[in-house]
Image (tube, grey):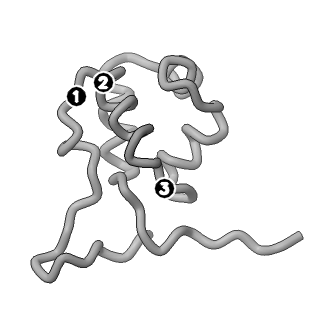
Amino acid sequence: MASRTRPSRLHQEPEAVTWARKKAGFTKRALAELVGISEQLMGEIESGWRSATPANLIKIADALNCPIVVLERKRHADGASPPAG
């Protein structure tokens, strides 16, 4: 079995996704069903093991009634993403 590595670039801030989901009162399973992804993928997005696609990040924000900017990975002044994890 190949070792798993975190993606070098994430579209989302994992902690922000978790915070917004809990604030909205959703379980991972309920949010995943609304977005149309698996509960496993939702967990991997929240833990930073997988990057949400831009389309899925929009769906997550819509489901949580949350501005997408709250969930997006913050950029450094040079345009680079901060390191994951």
Residue 45 lies, in percent from the top left, at 50, 47
Q: Quadrant of residue 61?
A: top left
Q: Is residue 66 left or right of residue 7?
A: left
Residue, far left: 77
Residue 54 lies, in percent from the top left, at 38, 47
> What amino acid type is highlighted by mark number 3?
Ser
Residue for badge 2 = 62
Q: Where is the N terminus found, in terms of image quarters?
A: bottom right
Residue for badge 3 = 51
Residue for badge 1 = 66
Q: Is residue 53 left or right of residue 22?
A: right
**Sequence order check: which comes first, mark 3 or mark 2?**
3
Q: Secondary structure at mark 3?
A: loop
Q: Quadrant of residue 17?
A: top left
Residue 66 lies, in percent from the top left, at 22, 28
Mark 1 to mark 2 CA distance (whole Å): 6 Å
Check disc 3: other Cα within 10 Å, few if <14, some if 14-19, many if 20+: many
Residue, far bottom: 78
Q: Which mark is residue 27?
A: none
Q: Residue at x 66, y 38 (%)?
A: 40
Give the answer, above or below, for where 17 lies relative to 82: above
> What amino acid type is highlighted by mark number 1?
Cys
Q: Residue at x 37, y 56 (%)?
A: 11
**Sequence order check: which comes first, mark 1 or mark 3?**
3
